[in-house]
Image (cartoon, grey):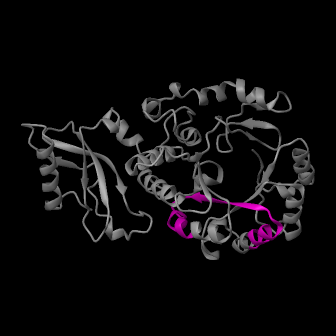
Amino acid sequence: MFVVSGGDPLWRPDLFELLQAAVDIGITPSVTPATTSRLTEETIQQFADIGVNRMALSLDGATAASHDAFRGETGTFQTVIEAAHHAREAGLSIQINTTVTAATVGELPAIADLAEELGAQMWEVFFLVPVGRGAQLAQITPERAHQVTEWLYNRSREASYRIITVEAPFYRRVARDMASETGDETPQVGSTGAGNGFVFVSHTGDVYPSGFMPLRAGNVREAQLSTIYRDAECMQRLRNRAGFDGPCGDCPATQYCGGSRSRAYAATGNPTGSDPLCPWVDEWSTSGTSPEASPCGVALRPAGNCHSLRLWRIGWNEHPNTLRVRGGRSLHHDPLTLPSHHHRWLLRGATVPYSRTTSDGVEIFNSILWGLISGRYMH
């Protein structure tokens, strides 16, 4: 797949020449133009006439007010809507791109509905990496990222378009877990990987593992792209998952997840470090063992009028006579649309009293119920 992106590729006077050259040698290109006054009906028709496979449009809010506020420019929402309609008339497939931040996460369900109304063939959901201007935006928490990817998986099972994530490879683990719970086949969910089936080439020819990782691997003016991708030291490190550091290196899901290399680099300066947005990194770090190896898992119904269960993994705490809640995941509900007052879960990191005369599961369960009844560990 060859995608011409930006910035705004429409500023290039040779853009259409480049797209035509790609088609002529058998590469079907896609394009991600900025939603400015340059994106006219005539421009979109020219994309279609050349043979562009797909045009991607950024949509970070479900209304003009929220999208334009996020983008910092009035009128961009209307430009997106008009461009989508022009593309449909020209027979050009569209893709919607959305960035997940603390400001946009609440509108994801409405954006998903709007993408369907616009006839999108794909919804590409970008989980914020704090680089460049993105460093000024508020990120979501790992727990929220877990909820969002669960919701995305459920939405993907009924959506008319394909859903893929960018910089959220833990989506693969979430999808596998949810599929195993429902007895479904292992899902083939899409999530890009820096330097692993993906590269970014800048307008000057510099090659990077991704557009979110400013770690130069070479330049196409000096070597073939395939050579850089195959032989550059940083590319090889990113594909050697056995050499990852910290929790991502020890995690049993590394081979099909691997964490966001770009976010690890942004947070630590180490491209093989651990992804701080991963929902499992914190509990792995504090326990020193896989969260899947905790002694028991207990399903508890939360307080409130809520038709769902919360699955908590409980592990022995270092402190005498307590258990520590390692973490959990919600089942059978849409966490994005539940009212906040229904989120009365056992607090992650809480300690629960128990008698250490036995490790019998019944006694553990009774101890946890005592904590729930007393209300000490609800929030």
Q: Quadrant of the N terminus?
A: top right
- The single residue placed furthest to the left in the displayed view is 357
Residue drawn at (33%, 50%) of the image: 328
Give x and y (percent) for residue 172: 51, 44
Left or right of residue 186, residue 29 in this image: right
Between residue 6 and residue 73, name the one nearer to us: 6
Point out the stretch of residues depicted in magenta: 82-110
Q: Is residue 349 above or below residue 60?
A: above
Left or right of residue 170, residue 214 in this image: right
Residue 125 visible in rendering: no
Give x and y (percent) for residue 301: 25, 60
Q: Is residue 377 above or below residue 209?
A: below
Q: How many marks?
A: 0
Give x and y (percent) for residue 316: 21, 38
Left or right of residue 367, residue 171 in this image: right
Q: Give the image quarter of residue 50.
A: bottom right
Residue drawn at (67%, 35%) of the image: 215
Between residue 233 and residue 119, name the one nearer to us: 119
Left or right of residue 350, residue 187 in this image: right
Residue 180 visible in rendering: yes
Residue 91 shown in magenta: yes
Q: Is residue 338 above or below residue 316?
A: below
Residue 199 shown in magenta: no
Between residue 219 and residue 46, name the one nearer to us: 46
Give x and y (percent) for residue 195: 65, 35
Q: Is residue 357 above or below residue 106?
A: above
